[in-house]
Amino acid sequence: MDMTHTRRQSQPIADDVMNDDSLYETRMPSSVRRYKTSSTAQRNPADEPISRQGAFIQRRRSSSQSTQGIASKAIAPPRERSEQRSFPLVPTVIGMIITIILIMSFSLASTWWNTYQDDLHYGRPRTSQMDAVVGHGDSASNPTHFIFMNLRRHVQIIEIPGGDPSRSRIFIGPTLYGDGQDLTPVTGEIRDINGDGKLDLIVHIQNQQVIFINDGTTFHSQ
């Protein structure tokens, strides 16, 4: 048998074999095999795959969800740290000490200012004076002169009737006790106390009053 004839016969066969693939239709799988999972597991729709024409596409988690998860973890304060916070004892004590010092300083400053004002008005020893017509040989042109004095805690009232020093009289008031009482001012007032028409003498010592009744010629302690 001729070899040339054999090759010519095999050539169409090879062409037929190569073209045989077009005779068979191939079909892509249209179903997706799914596997059952446990009922307790929760599915995230964003994590489930999508079948598109037989191909599997895995969804990506959105960056916003991941960012929110990280932010929530960063913002949430640890419970242990909040429970370990204690009362700020040291700043509170320092604030109380500063407040007490300020109150004491204000009190000392107020006391000093009042003492300074009394020094200007009454001097040392504390002394005040006034003139009045009380009917003890005096007149409007020659009134009686009164001197009220705190001499080392002893209150003394000096009366000079009609301005005549030779007729001067001294009335003894109360003795003052306590710290700083030697600097307490003493003042006087003339007013009819018992309603007999004669002006009586009232001595003011802080909140205390000492009354001397006028009998027409002199004063008597009530």
Image: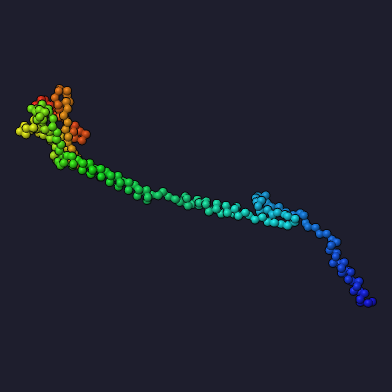
Give the answer, above or below, for where 3 lies relative to 26.
below
- Furthest residue in direction bottom, as rendered: 2
Residue nearest the viewer, comparing 162 with 114: 162
Residue sitting at 27 percent across and 43 percent down? 107
Q: Nearer the viewer, residue 8 or 48?
A: 8
Q: Position of residue 187 (x, y in %)?
A: 17, 34
Q: Can you name the residue that lies furthest to the top here?
A: 196
Asked if residue 171 shows in the view, the reply is no
Res 216 visible = yes
Residue at figure coordinates x 30%, y 47% from the top left: 101
Residue 143 x %, y %: 11, 30
Q: Residue furthest right?
A: 1
Q: Nearer the viewer, residue 62 or 31?
A: 62
How many numbered discs? 0
Task: Say above or below: 193 vs 35.
Answer: above
Quarter where residue 57 is shown: bottom right
Where, quadrant-wise, is the N terminus in this rendering? bottom right
The reply, left or right, for residue 18 in relation to residue 202 is right
Q: Quadrant of the C terminus?
A: top left
Q: Position of residue 190 (x, y in %)?
A: 16, 29
Question: Percent from the top left, x then y, of residue 28?
Answer: 78, 57
